[in-house]
Amino acid sequence: MKLTILDRITFDLAQINSSEWLIGIDEVGWGTIAGDLCIGAVAIHKSLLTNFPDDKTLAKIRDSKKLSEKIRSEINSYVQKYDFNDKLFFTIGQSSVNYINEHGL
């Protein structure tokens, strides 16, 4: 069964309504042809979605792969300065070509 965009949005909204935390994961790398695979994950407490400070810097986030280095640096500086009071966590992971070839994704 192929999911439609509406199915995905409905699922996401149900998750938002039933959970205290939202988690997003993204990767960068084009398989093992281009080298290591890097993965980023963010967990954000739902309360931050309504109480987040009004700041134009964060409004620039749309697609991280399309952000310029300057905008990425601005956003990084902002996030590093803000006190999230244990309501936002993030991590970055990396997997080598050899590891992926041996163990799979």
Image (spheres, rainbow, N blue to C red):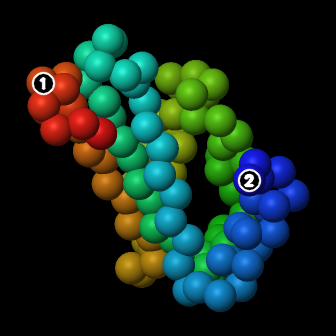
Q: Is residue 85 left or right of residue 54?
A: left
Mark 2 near mark 1, Cβ–Cβ under 8 Å? no
Q: Residues within 10 Å of mark 2 (few under 14, many from 20)?
A: few
Residue ID at (46%, 78%): 87
Q: Is residue 34 left or right of residue 95?
A: right
Where 26 sits versus 15, above or below?
above
Quadrant in the picture for residue 35:
top left
Q: Is residue 96 visible?
A: no
Q: Which residue is mark 2?
A: 1
* Direction front: furthest residue: 1
Q: Nearer the viewer, mark 2 or mark 1?
A: 2
Residue ID at (39%, 79%): 86
Q: Which residue is mark 1?
A: 98
Q: Secondary structure at mark 2?
A: loop
Q: Is residue 36 visible?
A: yes
Q: Residues within 10 Å of mark 1 (few under 14, many from 20)?
A: few
Image quarter of the C terminus: top left
Percent coordinates x, y for residue 27 in the rendering: 43, 37
Q: Secondary structure at mark 1?
A: helix
Percent coordinates x, y for residue 52 in the rendering: 65, 71
Give me the disc on residue 6.
Answer: none
Q: Is residue 91 left or right of residue 77?
A: left
Quadrant in the picture for residue 49:
bottom right
Residue ID at (65%, 88%): 18
The kind of residue on which mark 2 rests is Met
